[in-house]
Image (cartoon, coloured by chain):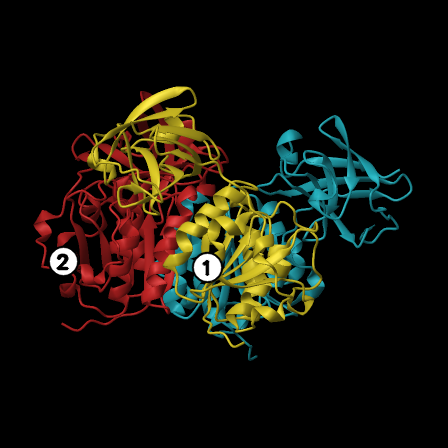
Chain colours: A yellow, B red, C cyan
């Protein structure tokens, strides 16, 4: 198997501000292996251990990168335990390296994966391999080797994609009653609340549910009910008013124009929202 | 029109920590267009929607970059509305791309602008263009195309620089009474308070007001009055004492040696300070 | 003296989120001098003025970078005063540039330094040189010139490494009583508490003190006593239980599995911990 390759590598971790030096160590190891690597920070501000947030961020960004970009994801509370490390390739030639802890199914659907291996060949690791920092010692160097053209099969045996751990996120859509029970996937700095309801145009993906532009819907959140208008952009309502829209990653997003909806509604990632479309 | 060009591109946004992935999407789009781009983060920690902060940061940093660097500024509360997107070139060959919302006049004075266009040609956009993320879909790709040598005129028609929106910042200087009423432009992590009083050497720019080194001045802040010594560097006063100096971007800066002046004085960006030079 | 060189340069500062633009100015100056420089952020989230944190971060990351990488360290409360600026080279061909304020002895031991100069030749500075931002005007450009192959001797006269300022960190090890009194060097985003007790395998470096795997030790912290188990990785104990391990930089680290040990124990950098190995 020969593979096309480039030098772009994206890093996604939950290391946070006080872990920026961990990211730096990973970059050092990568640059030792491939001095021409172009390393891009996807985010290092994933909430500690939040597989849900990390998967959402990866899913919503990878497709904007050049083909053959390699993404290394280190949100890894089980580091050093028996959880597998996976490297996979998509049919569109993106690469992902990370722990098998529930990340992958939310990033990429099975039918879009072309190759998947369990990373085990320590010829490609940084030695000595610590038991607490596989981002630096295993996943980073494996990512760097992929940018150098090393085929996935060199890292270990094929891994059955049906064994990729899955972490279901609650989403219940009742077409008849026109009710949606969904989950908060992400909250950004502006307080925009991204749900896991995917929209295509103005319709709920896979359902016969259309949202007419400018309609007002009721959102039930933490025993509180608010109304929000369906608009195309934030300033489609007055300042400080609730709105919802199809966000830039095509999920239904609840916001306030120039104010912080998440804060005002006391919402956090993983919370449930009930939407009444009747 | 032919243009010199290089591969450096700087990004300035108010996306914050939880919006680092938005920056990553912009970088992905830029690298798809110009895989050799060198992308530099100017800041992504501008306070949400603060045009004042963003303009100050851009103004105080751009001149340290190589000629032909392109700066993309995404502090854009009006995204998706009718506000224009502008691309301009300075006579010193720097490029700026951003929304026409008050940013530009604080970054660069009119007489230093050589070309200015309204960005409208969607051949240079990332498709489909979202209504909420023009940084990724319009401004980022336009910036990338500039690094590739695309002339500004390709992006749209010439834009009259007299129509660049201006947001005045309060600054009243009374030479006779030796009083200055100025505005806080920025507060950094150390709590250094940068005003909008520009100094040349020890004098107030454009006025016959000199500040003798080591003089003590009175600052009236939030109904409180403090005295601070004019020094050249922070350790020119004892630890925890107030001082002021000509900051590294040549504005008058109020500080405390190894302590946080902004916190202790409860100051924030946009606040007014009265300085008595008598 | 000829020197090997590459284009990698790492930046470590205490500029923080609201000082990201200061870092950007440094990068601009560096890219003006060496447009091919690959600049890596080591960390900019060192606590303000914390020489101890900065030295720990530098020490624990530099060795993962390619030979000839240049590191510029701007944690510099004495900027503009008479403290020297130092540039040094290690026998393994790493370069460090920073103020002589106690940083260096914790980064690199004397016997590993091959060259050391006092930076004074302003031909290599960014002009005009401010009195408050030597990172941008002196240390950054000197670092860039090193990546271009300028020998250290060009920057100034040789500097006696015995005059590198030292800031002792408390560490008292009593082999007989099997007691260790150590200091917190760093606390990361997960709340992992890194002490200054260096381990080799399971032994305390330089002492006849072995820690058997799975042993329970008593830690005395702020008049409180806890027990923690010695494991190899975080999930070696149940969630929310205390543990300690040899961290990824080979120091003894106190943690809680998927919880924040530092917060729960109210620990901060510089605090003292007493460990009872009896």
Q: Which residue is mark 1?
A: A112
Q: Quadrant of residue B125?
A: bottom left
Quick check: can you spot residue C28?
no
Q: Chain of mark 2?
A: B
Cα–Cα span, label 1 and label 2:
44 Å
**Percent position (x, y) of residue B256?**
44, 35
Q: x%, y% of residue A182?
A: 42, 34
Residue C261: quadrant of the picture:
top right
The outermost residue toward the front is A176
From the viewer's perspective, tell me whether residue A86 is left or right of residue B115.
Answer: right
B108 w.r.t. C150: above or below: above
Name the mark on residue B116.
2
Query: Mark 1 belongs to which subunit?
Result: A
Looking at the image, can residue B253 be seen? yes
Seen in the picture, residue A258 relative to C38 is either above or below; the reply is above
Q: Which mark is residue B53?
A: none
Q: Circle 2 sits in a helix, a strand or a loop, which is it?
A: strand
Residue displayed at 71% across by 64% down? C111
Q: Is residue B147 left or right of residue A20?
A: left
Quadrant for the N terminus of chain C in the image? bottom right
Which of pointers 1 and 2 indicates the residue nearer the eye? 1
- Residue A75 place in picture, x, y as percent: 56, 48
Q: Nearer the viewer, residue C111 or A277?
A: A277
**Both labels 1 and 2 in a single chain:** no
In the rendered image, the quadrant that contains the C terminus of chain C is top right
* Label 1 with label 2: CB-CB less than 8 Å: no
Mark 1 surroundings within 10 Å by alpha-carbon count, few (fewer than 14), some (14 through 19), many (20 or more): few
Q: Nearer the viewer, residue A3 or C194?
A: A3
């Amino acid at each position: 198997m020969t593979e096309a390759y480039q030098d772009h590598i994206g890093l996604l971790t939950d290391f946070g501000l006080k872990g920026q030096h961990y990211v730096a160590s990973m970059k050092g190891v990568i640059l030792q292996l491939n001095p021409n690597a172009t390393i891009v920070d996807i985010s290092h501000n994933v909430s500690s251990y939040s597989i849900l947030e990390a998967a959402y961020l990866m899913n919503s960004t990878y497709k904007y990168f050049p083909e053959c970009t390699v993404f290394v994801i280190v949100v890894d509370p089980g580091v050093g335990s028996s959880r597998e490390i996976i490297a996979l390739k998509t049919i569109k030639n993106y690469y992902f390296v990370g722990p098998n802890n529930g990340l992958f199914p939310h990033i990429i659907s099975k039918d879009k994966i072309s190759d998947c291996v369990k990373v085990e060949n320590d010829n490609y690791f940084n030695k000595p391999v610590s038991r607490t920092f596989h981002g630096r010692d295993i996943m980073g160097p494996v990512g760097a080797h992929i940018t150098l053209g090393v085929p996935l099969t060199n890292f270990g045996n094929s891994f059955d994609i049906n064994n990729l751990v899955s972490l279901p996120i609650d989403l219940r859509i009742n077409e008849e009653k026109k009710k949606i029970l969904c989950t908060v996937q992400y909250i950004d700095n502006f307080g925009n609340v991204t749900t896991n309801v995917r929209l295509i145009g103005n319709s709920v993906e896979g359902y016969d549910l259309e949202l007419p532009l400018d309609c007002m819907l009721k959102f039930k959140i933490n025993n509180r009910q608010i109304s929000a208008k369906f608009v195309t952009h934030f300033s489609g309502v007055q300042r400080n008013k609730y709105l919802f829209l199809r966000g830039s990653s095509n999920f239904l997003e609840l916001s306030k124009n120039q104010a912080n909806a998440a804060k005002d509604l006391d919402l956090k990632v993983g919370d449930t929202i009930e939407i009444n479309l009747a």
